[in-house]
Each structure stands twice: as C-alpha cells, then as structure tokens.
Image: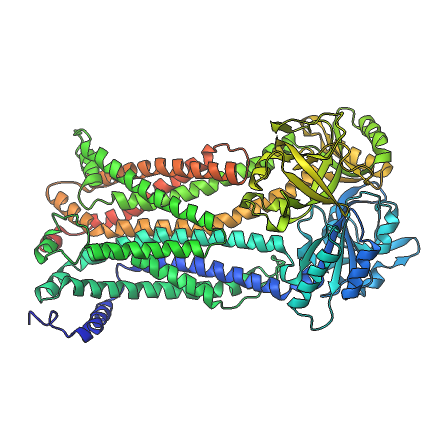
C-alpha cells in the first residue's frame, strides 16, 4: 500500500499525474476563481487588442486603393505639377487631380467660418464613390449654373452657419450653391485631421476663387490608377522611376499598400500601448496566480500529506499539482482567447457608425497564439515557485505549517524553471513589440516596481515588528497582524500598489492634458492665425488689422513648406532617427527665413547670423529634434522647397516655446536662402487676455470682407478640435487601463479571501478568550487602514513620478501635480481595501467556535 505511488512504472507517471489532477478537479474550482479570472482577463486584453489591430491593418490594406484614391498618390505643396511631371504620370495610367486647402466660407450677412476645401476634377474618384444626400452624379452637383458653382458640404457646416441646402456662400471671389450634403468621402482617411468641415467643389471653381496665388498653402494630389492587373512590382517600378527621372520633384509618394502611414503608425503605437496594458494586467494577475496557488496548497495540506505517507515522491506531488494548475490556466486562457477573438466583431458592430475605419473583423491565429503563450507563461512563471516548495516539505512540517509556517526556497531546478518561464515571457514581450526599446523599458520598470513594492511590504512589516508596545489591545492586535507569519501585507501592498500607481498615472496625465489644452493654452494662445497673405498686401494687411483691433498685437513672418530630403549627406529614408524625432521626416514642414531670432525661440548652441547676413544658406534647427536626427552644428541639411533642393549648413540650435502657439518653426533659414521664390506670409493676432467673442467676430468679418483670399484660422476652434482628440485619447487610455485595475481588484479580493481561513481561526480563539465582535472589527479596520495608507503613499508617489516623466519627456509638456485626482484615487483605494477586508471579516466573526475548535 505504501508503495503504490512510488513504484508506478515510468511510462505511466505522466498519465498518473494527469489522472490524479483531473480527479481532484472533480471537486470543483473552489479557490481558483481569481486565478482563472486573472488569466482570462489578461489574455482577453492581449488577444482582443491584437485581433482588433490586425483586423484594422487588414482593412486598411484591403481598402488601400479606395482610401488613397488610387494605386499611387503624388502630393505637392504650394505648387502644381510641371508639364514634364504630368507627362510622366499620364504615361503610367489614368490620373486624377485634387487640391486641398483651408479657406473661409462667408454668408451674405457676413458670418464666416473655416472650411477644409477640396477641389476635384472630372476623373475623381478613381476608386470608390462619393455618397451625397440627395444622391446625384458628382459632375452635376459641382457644375456651374449661372453665376454660382455647385458644392457638396459637410452637414456640420450647415449647422455651424445655420444654412439649408440650396443656400449660397462665398469663398474668395467665387459664389457657391450648397446642393447636397456629404455622406461619405472615399479618400477621407488619407486627408488627415481637419479643423473645419469639408466643402467639395470642382477644380474650375477653385481657380475662380482667386485663392491660387503664388506661394499659397495648397496641397495638390495626383492620384494614379494603374492598368488592370498591375501588381506590387508595377507599383514599385513606377515609384523608382519617379525618383530616378524626377529626383528634385520633392513630392510625397504613397502607394495603395501605404495609403495612411500616419494611421498605420498610430495603430502600431496604440496597439503596443494596449498590449503592454494587457501584459500589465497579466503581471498583476500573476500575483493572483501565486496567491491562489499558495491558498490551494494550503487547503490541500492533508491530501499532500496523505500522498507522501503513501510513498509519493516530491517530484510526483509537484507534477500532479503543476498539471492541475496548468489545466486551470488553460481554462482561463481558453475563456480569454474566446473573448479576444470576438472583440473585433463586437467593436465593429458597436462602433460601425462612429469609426470611419475600414475594419475587417476576422479570427487571427497568430495573435491568438501570442496571447496563448502570454497566458501559459504567466501561469507557469508565478506558480512554479510556490509549487516547487512542496517538494521538500516533510509530512510533519505540512501539518505544523498551521501554527509555525517555515519559509523555504524551492529546489534549484524549480527556481530555474520559474526563472526560465519569466525570461521567456520577457523575450516574448520584447520581440513582439512595435518599439522594442519601449518594451525593454516596460520590463525593467515592471521588475523595479515589483521589487519596490516588495521592499515597501518588508519595510512595513519591519516597522510593525519594531513598533513600541501600545496600551490598546486592538492596536497591538492590528500591528501584530501586519508582521505575523502568513500576514497578508506583501500581497495587499503588491496588488493595491500596482493598481493605484497605474490609476494615479492615468489621472495625472489626464489632468495635465486637460489643463494644457483646455485651460492654459487658450489663455496665452493667439486669437487667430491668418494664412496666405500675399507680399503685395502685407503692409496694407498690417495697417488694416491695427485699425480694426488697436489693442491686439500682430506678428507676421514669411512661410513656405519644405520637406527634408537629406541630412549629413544621407537620404531621409536612410536616416535612423530616435522615435520621438521621426515625425519631422514624414511629411513637409513649415519653414521661414529671417535675420532676427524668432519670438519664442532661444539660441542655445552656435551663433545667430544677424540681420545683415548675405552668404551661403545657413540653418537654425530645433535642438531636441536635431539631437533626435543625430545632427550637430556644421552638418548640412537638404530641404526640397517648391521642387528645388536647397542645402544649408546648421549654424545654431534653438529651444522653442511650442506651448505659446505662436509662429514657431523647426527650420529657420538665413535671409536670401529662397531668393526669388513665391512666398506668402503667415500672421498671428493676439488680444490681451484672449479677447472677447465680439472682438473675434468683428475682426473675422472685417478681414473676410477686405481680404477675401486670406484664410483665418480661429485658434479657439483649433484648440477645441485638438482638445477633443486628446479627450478621446485619454478616454481610450482610461478604458484600456481599467483592465489592469480590474485585475488588481481581483487580486486584492483573492488575497483577502485566501486569508479567510486564518481570520476564522483568529476570530474564534479571540472570541473564546473574551474579545467582542466590536473589538475585533476595530482591530481589523485599523490593520487594513494602516496597510492601505502605506500602500497609498507609495502608489501616489510612483504614479505621480511616472506621469511626470511621460508628460515631460514623451509629450514635452510642462507638468503640474494635480492633488485632487490623486486624493480621490487614494480614497477609492482605501475604501476598496476596507470593503474587501471587512466582507471576509464579518464572515469570520459569524462562525461558531465549537465547530472550528474541534478541527484545530
């Protein structure tokens, strides 16, 4: 009998371990609810994020031609394509031309608003269709009838100006009849973020407005439809031919496979963030896994002892319970995978009308496989250590653990196995990340936070152990509970500390973004940006604004748009910038030239050239971005402006006050760098204290009537648009981070539930010795409050520091600590700790002493 387990044939050992594990599971999953929930939650987050992102990427790729408006798109800023360039495009396939710019739409009674004007030719759209209400052929809707051209309008414009279909507006020097509302625009995603409603007109109508002046900020898009059956090799050939035959064109070339690079990059970044959130949830849940495993083994003390008494080896006992734990983990993983696989379908159904994205929901095996690996590795990494401890604990020690638990490290092989599982989890997180540097930082930060929280718990227990003996019995009992063997202190501090630190981080970032975009920016920002001021009208414009708004300040500078094509003799495509500087190379940038240091800038390296400089082109570069591109003083940078490559030498580096929202530039050239180029001016008008709506409306109306081709951008509207984007982003971050917070709450509840049996014994013994229910509740409240307060201090400090670094380093915004959100989060954390603790305490206090004492 004593050798039944010990003498089982080797070939049957694995089957025996599995069979015994399955038999024990027949008793139910009691004690493993938190275990399964934590694994399922983290796996669902990772699988859902990965599946949704891949569905979106697949949709973008599938609809690439429609989103881009062609198989290839060639974009130019401030100039139209030359005859040789048009000839090249026409030889490749069918060409459609569209122009986009910002303009002012005015009504007959003087009301005006900013619109995103889009002019199209007869071939538009090459792919997809424009849906309007009422439906009609595009050519008919945009045709000229009498003295007015047709226009299709975003319904938001009708609401903003209180107009009905059929009403007339004026843009520049042309009159337009609003003939239909725009329902869908096939290439909308390729246009980026707009600050005004869309207004679609014909190319002929655009030319009639008088807005097409030399240097005007107009972006020309030449969409190319290749012959039927043209594959990616043809797309590549056309792209390479364009670069070879027209090297100085300076156009931005996009293909159907890269129709929305900015959206694709944002999807990748946001996917990484959400994946890290899911991984954080798994790590937090890992604490719950470890707690559940320890609690499970504690409840199985008698069973383990019996198995060892019958001759089971430590290896056999470990194999049985490790198999059981992994089977339970598999249940959690299966639930998480099912939820994650359904996530794209649920999101597509729920947000179909809110997300103008070509989502193609489907099941993605690779994403699910990665989530499967994350879940199983997390379960193994956090359960191997407590399971390995069982191997060397003798039967007598197992029974003695009830009153004298001994801290033992598992055998080296179990410790190595746990370490290898954690290492595999780390490698998977880093290798699967879009930004591996960020993933490494996350891993290091996670290890640091775990270590710090463990130190906080150890320090709290040490302080409690050395605390002076108080006269109050309840205080002595509460303090003793904090440091006694088997205390909940490490688990409560770890779970509550992680959740609170993340919550404070999100709340502080939210508060700073809201303060910056909703409160601080409008107070110091200009009231208007005025674009496309022609050089011949510049002095007259200045005099007019000063006469109309005598108390406002005016700042005007020349501006062009240019694209960095090379630096240090290296093509822009071959540069390897830091992630925070990549955006400078992705499209054209605003540039200017001046003899004076621009307002809001400060030279920190090198020397300024001065007003009287007359020599080879020199360049002033924003310092952080120059460092991100690996540039220094003396390096040469080539910028394509209006189809001409201009090479300049970096003479100095500047810091720029971007938060002022003044006229600031990354690139500032010396005078004469663009001699002879058609240039328009850009100006800002700032009222002291931000001005009043009446002042804004009066100036906007006056400028629109006198300078119809000048575009006014109300900064308040732009800030509101950006603020809405920021609000939506923070909301998405909050929702995503809630996964980790739910995991932390689950772990905390599981930890307190795991200690329930010890609480029952404590309560029964103390009640037998004369303690009242009120005294015991008081002691437990004091204990949980002390634990909660210590953890809150760490969580608030860690979360505030994390938010500070994110806001200051990643978002490059000033950071101000917001006490209100931090205090609110702390109070919620304390309330949750007390609630969960007292729920278990009331149950313990209700147990009858006799039934418990008989089993001691």
Q: Residue at x 17, y 50 (%)?
A: 408
Q: Residue at x 36, y 58 (%)?
A: 39
Please identify the residue farthest to the left as the structure is shown. Answer: 1
Task: Work out whether residue 52 or residue 627 is closer to the camera in this orientation and state it.
Answer: 627
Residue 544 in the figure: left or right of residue 630: right
Residue 491 in the figure: left or right of residue 316: right
715 relative to 312, above or below: above
300 relative to 591, above or below: below
The quarter of the rendered structure image containing the N terminus is bottom left
Query: How many labels, in total?
Result: 0
Percent across and percent down for residue 677 are 81, 40
Percent across and percent down for residue 754 are 24, 52
Q: Can residue 34 be seen?
A: no
> To which quarter of the image does residue 543 belong?
top right
Q: Residue at x 29, y 64 (%)?
A: 326
Percent across and percent down for residue 789 are 32, 36
> To which quarter of the image does residue 619 belong?
top right
Task: Work out whether residue 416 or residue 368 is closer to the camera in this orientation and state it.
Answer: 416
Percent across and percent down for residue 639 are 70, 43
Residue 98 in the figure: left or right of residue 649: right
Q: Can residue 675 be seen?
A: yes
Residue 318 in the figure: left or right of residue 689: left
Please identify the residue farthest to the right as the structure is shown. Answer: 146
């Amino acid at each position: 009998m004593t050798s039944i387990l010990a003498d089982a044939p080797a070939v049957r050992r694995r089957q025996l371990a599995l069979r015994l594990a399955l038999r024990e599971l027949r008793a139910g999953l009691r004690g493993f609810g938190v275990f399964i929930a934590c694994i399922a939650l983290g796996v669902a987050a990772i699988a859902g994020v990965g599946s949704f992102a891949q569905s979106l990427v697949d949709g973008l790729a599938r609809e690439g031609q429609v989103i881009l408006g062609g198989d290839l798109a060639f974009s130019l800023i401030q100039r139209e394509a030359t005859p040789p360039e048009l000839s090249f495009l026409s030889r490749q396939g069918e060409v459609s031309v569209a122009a986009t710019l910002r303009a002012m739409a005015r009504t007959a009674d003087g009301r005006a608003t900013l619109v995103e004007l889009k002019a199209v030719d007869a071939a538009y759209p090459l792919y997809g269709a424009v849906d309007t209400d009422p439906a009609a052929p595009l050519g008919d809707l945009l045709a000229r009838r009498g003295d007015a051209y047709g226009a299709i309008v975003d319904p938001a414009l009708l609401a903003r100006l209180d107009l009905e279909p059929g009403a007339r507006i004026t843009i520049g020097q042309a009159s337009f009849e609003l003939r239909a509302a725009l329902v869908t625009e096939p290439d909308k995603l390729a246009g980026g973020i707009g600050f005004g409603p869309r207004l679609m007109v014909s190319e002929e109508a655009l030319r009639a407005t008088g807005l097409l002046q030399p240097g005007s900020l107009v972006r020309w898009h030449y969409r190319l439809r290749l012959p039927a059956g043209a594959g990616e090799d043809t797309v590549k050939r056309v792209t390479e031919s364009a670069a070879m035959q027209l090297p100085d064109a300076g156009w931005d070339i996009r293909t159907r496979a890269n129709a929305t690079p900015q959206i694709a990059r944002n999807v990748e970044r946001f996917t990484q963030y959400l994946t890290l959130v899911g991984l954080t949830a798994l790590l937090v849940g890992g604490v719950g896994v470890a707690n559940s495993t320890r609690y499970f083994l504690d409840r199985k003390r008698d069973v383990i002892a019996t198995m060892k008494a019958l001759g089971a080896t430590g290896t056999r006992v470990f194999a049985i319970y490790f198999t059981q734990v992994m089977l339970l983990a598999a249940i959690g993983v299966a639930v998480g995978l099912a939820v994650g696989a359904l996530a794209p379908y649920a999101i597509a159904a729920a947000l179909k009308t809110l997300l103008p994205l070509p989502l193609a929901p489907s099941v993605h095996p690779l994403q699910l496989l990665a989530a499967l690996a994350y879940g199983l590795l997390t379960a193994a990494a956090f359960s191997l250590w407590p399971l390995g401890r069982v191997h060397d604990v003798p039967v007598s020690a197992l029974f003695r653990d009830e009153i004298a638990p001994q801290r033992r490290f598992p055998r080296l092989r179990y410790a190595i196995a746990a370490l290898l599982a954690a290492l595999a989890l780390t490698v998977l997180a880093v290798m699967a990340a879009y930004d591996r540097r960020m993933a490494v930082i996350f891993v290091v930060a996670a290890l640091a936070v775990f270590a710090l929280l463990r130190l906080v718990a150890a320090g709290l227990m040490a302080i409690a152990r050395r605390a002076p003996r108080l006269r109050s019995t309840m205080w002595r009992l509460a303090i003793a509970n904090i440091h006694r063997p088997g205390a909940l202190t490490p688990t409560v501090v770890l779970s509550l500390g992680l959740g609170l630190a993340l919550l404070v981080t999100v709340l502080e970032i939210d508060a700073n973004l809201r303060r910056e975009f909703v409160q601080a920016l409008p107070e110091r920002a200009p009231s208007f940006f005025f674009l496309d001021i022609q050089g011949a009208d510049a002095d007259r414009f200045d005099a007019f604004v000063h006469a109309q708004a005598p108390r406002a300040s005016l700042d005007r500078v020349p501006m062009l748009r240019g694209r960095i094509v090379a630096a240090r003799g290296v093509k822009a495509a071959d540069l390897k910038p830091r992630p925070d500087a990549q955006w400078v190379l992705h499209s054209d940038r605003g540039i200017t030239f001046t003899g004076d240091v621009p307002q809001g800038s400060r030279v920190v390296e090198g020397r300024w050239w001065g007003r009287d400089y007359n020599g080879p082109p020199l360049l002033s570069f924003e310092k952080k971005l120059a460092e991100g591109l690996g540039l220094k003083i003396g390096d040469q940078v080539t910028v394509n402006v209006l189809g001409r490559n201009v090479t300049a030498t970096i003479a100095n580096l500047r810091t720029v006050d971007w938060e002022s929202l003044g006229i600031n530039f990354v690139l500032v050239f010396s005078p004469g760098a663009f001699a002879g180029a058609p240039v328009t001016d850009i100006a800002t008008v700032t009222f002291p204290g931000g001005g009043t709506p009446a002042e804004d409306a009066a100036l906007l109306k006056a400028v629109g009537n006198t300078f119809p081709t000048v575009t006014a951008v109300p900064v308040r509207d732009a800030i509101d648009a950006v603020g809405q984007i920021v609000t939506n982003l923070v909301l998405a971050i909050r929702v995503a981070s809630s996964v980790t917070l739910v995991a932390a709450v689950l772990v905390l509840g599981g930890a307190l539930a795991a200690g329930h049996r010890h609480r029952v014994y404590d309560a029964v013994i103390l009640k037998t010795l004369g303690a009242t229910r009120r005294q015991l509740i008081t002691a437990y409240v004091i204990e949980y409050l002390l634990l909660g307060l210590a953890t809150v201090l760490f969580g608030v400090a860690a979360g505030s520091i994390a938010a500070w670094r994110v806001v200051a380093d990643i978002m490059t915004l000033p950071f101000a600590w917001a006490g209100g959100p931090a205090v609110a989060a702390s109070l919620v954390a304390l309330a949750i700790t007390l609630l969960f603790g007292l729920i278990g305490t009331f149950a313990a206090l209700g147990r009858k002493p006799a039934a418990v004492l008989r089993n001691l």
